[in-house]
Amino acid sequence: MAVKAMTAKEVAQKVLNKENVFLLDVRNENDFNDWKIEGENFEYVNKPYFELIDGIEPIQDQLPEDKEILSVCAKEGSSIMVAEMLNEAGYKAAYLKGGMKSWSETLHKAKVYEDEEISVYQFIRVGKGCLSYMVVSEGEALIVDPARFTEQYEAAAKELGAEITHVVDSHLHADHISGGKELSDKLGAKYYLMKSEGAIFDFLHLEDHDKIEFNKVSVEVLAVKTPGHTPGSVSFLVNNQLLFSGDTIFISGLGRPDLGNKVREWAMDLYDTVHSKVAEIIDDVIVLPAHYADLDKEINSEGYIGSTLGEIRNRNNEMFTATKEEFLESVEKSASSVKPPNFEEIIAINRGVESADIDRLQELEIGPNRCAVHHTD
């Protein structure tokens, strides 16, 4: 009897529904500790599969008899073997189809906002902590900070009866491959990025556009005014109601400014951003970031990651009230944390100076996002 496969989308739904799941991760201990499937009500046992080749006896006393056990590995092969052994021993088991690679690539669509002029959707990359968006108005769609899984945005647009006509990246991403250029090439959509980010392919320069407008959408480009994570980081204020903040402002922190090895210089830019441009924006604006750190703490009651700017100010009060020197010291201390894996190669690919096949792209993106500092407890 074939062992049951559970898709990454099914697991993501269990995470979002806060279901109880018992997970047996058969990767190496270091890989498990660095990055795992996280759910508020998940239970875990980690045991490398090569220690289970002769049977599950070493962990049998840790396994529940009344719950389904989800076996997880990097690509799926080892987890199938372990799930089969579990079933043979009388347990109810399943394995994660595609392993942690598939977990890294799953997008969950959530509705954020709707009025008579626009509707807005968030795409939550549950296994990676990345967020992207679709803004729809009268049959046209804008994509903000897309992942490389362009077919998922195309399918969502088709379902909504829209055509993707505009694509924007808030900065040159360091932890994942952007789908911006591919969407532009495939669909003829207008693709916008800061020229100062150094991409070598053709695109529209955000420095030349104070606003991007189509149908009932007005996107104010806060360009060259919200640096911090990278020198060319921008934010997008849509219809004066929604702030797509990229990696500048998160729900529980700010973007880390140390990936260019200019920590203090870029931290000063980040301080000026927070205490000048952001200070001018009203509290009621909904902030929609490009990443999150803790799904359980940051997802709201409406099912998406976002919050009003006023709530974020209250939540991160020290960041918004610190003196410049206090702010710089705090950022420099946080900058000692582990950098995104493979970030230099990912940036080079996003810049267009390097390329990679699909297997390499998957390898580069494996792991959690590490683009933030200052997260609250």
Image: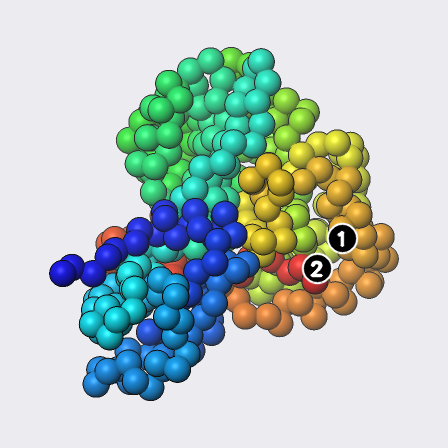
Tell me the CA gap for discs 1 and 2.
Answer: 7 Å
Place residue 238 in its image quadrant.
top right
Instruction: Kindly identify which residue carries mark 1.
Output: 316
Is residue 152 visible in the rendered image? The answer is yes
Three-letter residue code for mark 1: Asn
**In the image, what residue occupies the spot 33% across and 30% down?**
154
Mark sitting on residue 376: 2
Which residue: 48% across, 22% down?
Answer: 136
Q: Secondary structure at mark 1?
A: loop
Compared to residue 174, the image places residue 168 above or below, namely: above
Residue 164's image quarter? top left
Compared with 297, 241 (above or below) is above
Side of 4 where 178 appears, left or right: right
Residue 364 appears at what percent x and percent y?
A: 36, 61
Position above or below: 323 against 208: below
Q: Which mark is residue 273?
A: none
Q: Is the residue 168 above or below the residue 105 in the image?
A: above
Q: Residues within 10 Å of mark 1 (few under 14, many from 20)?
A: some
Q: Amino acid at mark 2?
A: Thr
- Given residues 65 and 289, the one toward you in this image is 65
**Do tag 1 and tag 2 residues touch (Cβ < 8 Å)?**
yes
> Callout 2: helix, strand or loop?
loop
* Closest to the observer, 136 or 74: 74
Where is residue 138 shown, x and y percent of the image? 47, 13
The furthest residue to the left: 1
**Quadrant containing the N terminus in the rendered view:** bottom left
Residue at (70, 59) in percent of width and height = 376
